[in-house]
Amino acid sequence: MEQNDIPEIALDWHRAGRGAVLATVVETWGSAPRQAGSQLVVAGDGAMMGSVSGGCVEGAVVTEAEEALRDGKSRLLTFGVSDETAFAVGLACGGTIRVLVEPVGQGLPVEMLAALVAARAARQRVAYAVNLESWDRWLLSPGDDVLADARLRSDKAGREEDGRFIAPHNPPLRLVVVGAVHIAQPLIPMARACGYDPVLIDPRGAFGSAERFPGETILEDWPDEALAALRPDARMAVVTLTHDPKLDDPAIRIALRSPVFYLGCLGSTRTHAKRLERLRAEGFAEADIARIHAPVGLDIGAKSPAEIAVSIMAQITEKLRKG
């Protein structure tokens, strides 16, 4: 499992009889390296997965988690760190971090955690809310709660003025790669490491083979049909890599007619100029074609397939975080 599958790991550990405690970053100030919503799960045997700070704060949290398993009580921990001692606990320039610790089955109900895991598996948008004073808890779907809806839209966890901590659980971001070429081989695992669900589209069986992309989701339909069936939305990025207009252009047209947050296309400046000519001839407006990032990736002087993949993920991240 990935480290962003912390709720799933916690449920598995609890059901296996190992015990599980979820630790969640609630608030940060200063230079805390992990944002609100970041999670760590601790088992009764001392095993742990995830991170709430990247430093020695984890040690203190694990100790509190072990105590929470014994007494069955949730708690809210605050770690304030001065500039002089910050580095030792993972806060590079000083700061404060507040961490919610919830033992599964005693603090956090197993049924609620199971419902959260089921919603995540079904790619349903849901927010987990907990009142940090009364310890009341809710799972909220879109439309249930104004503040939860705002958190789902921003995709950022945080504490509200009404005393609740609300953590959105949106479906994972998706990256669709058109073209099972050499660049796609490092790009897809990089995307997964960044929290994306990658999908590879290539109707050419020799390219999109399981041998070249073991364990990956590979669609062999024509790119426009495959992409349309995936129902592109604002949590999807699309990258075309084939250099072949017969394959790239159909996917580009679908992407431009959808709200995908990123569209990048491999090819030289000359290749892209010809691509734009074709799109204009098909009636696409300048505002539409201006959404295309081409040549794809940040200009970092990348040469090898892995370096180009790094430049592509960097540009996708820049678009996601900075708009």
Image (cartoon, rainbow, N blue to C red):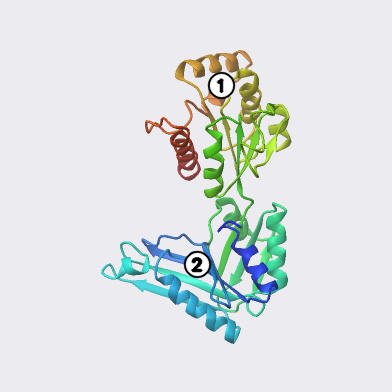
**Which SS class for mark 1?**
loop
Residue 159 visible somewhere in the drawing: no
Q: Residues within 10 Å of mark 2 (few under 14, many from 20)?
A: many
Picture coordinates of residue 96 (x, y %)?
A: 38, 69
Picture coordinates of residue 228 (x, y %)?
A: 71, 33
Q: Quadrant of the N terminus?
A: bottom right
When the figure is inspected, residue 16 is found, relative to residue 225, above or below; the finding is below
Position of 92 with respect to 194 (left or right) is left
Q: Amino acid at mark 2?
A: Val
Q: Residue at (40%, 66%) from the top-left corner?
A: 55
When the figure is inspected, residue 35 is found, relative to residue 278, above or below; the finding is below
Name the residue carrying label 1.
Answer: 243
Picture coordinates of residue 52 (x, y %)?
A: 47, 65
In the rendered structure, which disc, 2 or 1, sits on the residue that comes first in sequence? Answer: 2
Near-viewer residue (152 or 219): 219
Q: Residue at (53%, 83%) from the top-left corner?
A: 67
Q: Residue at (69%, 51%) from the top-left corner?
A: 123
**Which SS class for mark 2?**
strand
| Residue 175, quarter of picture | top right
The label number, if any, that marks residue 26 in the structure image:
2
Picture coordinates of residue 278 (x, y %)?
A: 59, 14
Q: CA distance from mark 2 to mark 1?
A: 46 Å
Position of 297 with respect to 92 (left or right) is right
